Image (tube, grey):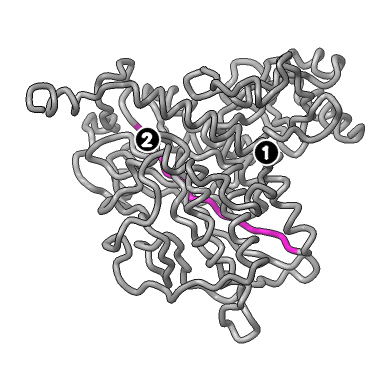
Amino acid sequence: MDSEIQRIKDWLQQRQIAEVECLVPDMAGTARGKFIPAHQFLSRGEPHLPESIMIQTVTGAYSDEHWDLVEPTDADMILKPDASTLRIVPWAREPTAQIIHDCYTMAGNPHPLSTRNVLRKVLALYEAQGLRPVVAPEVEFFLVRKNTDPDYELQPPAGRSGRSETSRLSYSMDAVAEFEDFVEDMYEFAAAQQLQVDTLIHEDGAAQMEINFEHGAPLDLADQVFTFKRTVRETAHRHGMYATFMAKPMLREPGSAMHIHQSLVRVATGENIFSDSGGGYTKAFLSYIAGLQRYTPELISFYAPNVNSYRRLAPEIAAPINLNWGMDNRTTAFRVPHSDAAGTRVENRFPGADVNPYLAFAATLASGYLGMQRGLEPGQPHRGTANEEDVGVARTLEEGLRHLQDSPEIIEVFGELFLRAYAAVKLDEFEEFNRVISSWEREHLLLQV
């Protein structure tokens, strides 16, 4: 760690950094932490944060199980900086650095409620087998007009023509050009932070974009997605708009996903274990897919973590609703794209754009790992339109959490305490949402039931 600290110190001094953002991804995948003057960051030692921030809901509340999940004294966590995540903050007014920290207990052990530590634990399972997962996320988001009153529906922003989109413009070059200034600044900020963003396309929705990341190591990509979301929101603010990663922000628009392409390579040789010497699919690949099918119903709340998420997982809106897999079939949950042998992979299409990337990666990789370990076998690949079949996954957050701790192997991988904490936080959010009476209920039930 001393060499890491020296590396950080040299980096900060070379760039004359004035302030450091010490960041921790919380349960929802949003940034918690501290601003610390650079000279104090270097001299003060490792920063601390109360461990209770890991079990706050998105509304800032705590569940009734709060004190059963953390120390009654609300003890601190030790934050240890990860030098590989050191980046400039390109939108800051003065030279500012950001660095993602790992969380440890006061006894020096990895903190069990840290979502980054959960992903590390899953990756260690692969490392023990001499395997290295490779992932490539595709992240969708909407640009919307500024909306300071939550009672009003979101609307697409005006582009450089002064007009808002009103039609489906998937892959439209002109539609992207409407927001050229935003796109250029977003790429500039991404480059300044060494985010490996690749292709940008216009998606199906009005002012809906998708960014593809280059494939790479899961922890690094999770850090990049975590950073990218902040970057897009900051860029949108500069252009008088909001950017939202809600899974289903608007009634008449499609949802936003974070599809995850994934493969496995042998550390010793670099070969993709999903493809055999003849270019066919290996037993490991089919068992991996079977693991996705087997454990997704239990882990669906990691792919759909918010009450809004389940509005996207609905029939006829281009999102998966059952556990089918298929060959280059975008209507299935688990799609195997056409590729050469080295590029053999499976795409998990369940995760929404609103996921915590650390947990979404951990869930999909853990599912595939358990499928291989247990030698599971998938059904036949689906050849029709899969979203015309019956719904096979939860339709509410509460239902999605109901079976989270059913399997001993899932408990072993994620940790009983973490699963209890996650369920407590998300159930509290569900109950708070459930207390809100919607306009639909007032319109259709007020005088008719």
Q: Is residue 186 magenta?
A: no
**Residue type at the position of mark 2:** Asn
Secondary structure, magenta segment, majority class: strand
Residue at left offset 25%, top offset 26%: 153
Quadrant housing residue 243:
top left
What crowding class fits label 1: few (fewer than 14 Cα within 10 Å), some (14-19), or many (20 or more)? Answer: many
Which residue is farthest right? Answer: 2
* Residue at the (86%, 19%) spot, across then down: 45
SS of the residue under disc 2: loop
Residue 87: give its label: none
Q: Position of residue 274 (x, y in %)?
A: 61, 72
Q: Nearer the viewer, residue 208 or 121?
A: 121
Which quarter shows the C terminus?
top left
Disc 1 secondary structure class: helix
Residue at which label 2 appears: 308
Assess whether residue 136 is covered by the magenta stretch.
Answer: yes
Magenta stretch? Answer: 131-143
Q: Which mark is residue 116?
A: 1
Q: Residue furthest left?
A: 448
User: Which amino acid does the dot numbered 1 rest on?
Assistant: Arg
- Viewed as shown, does residue 303 lie left or right of 157? right
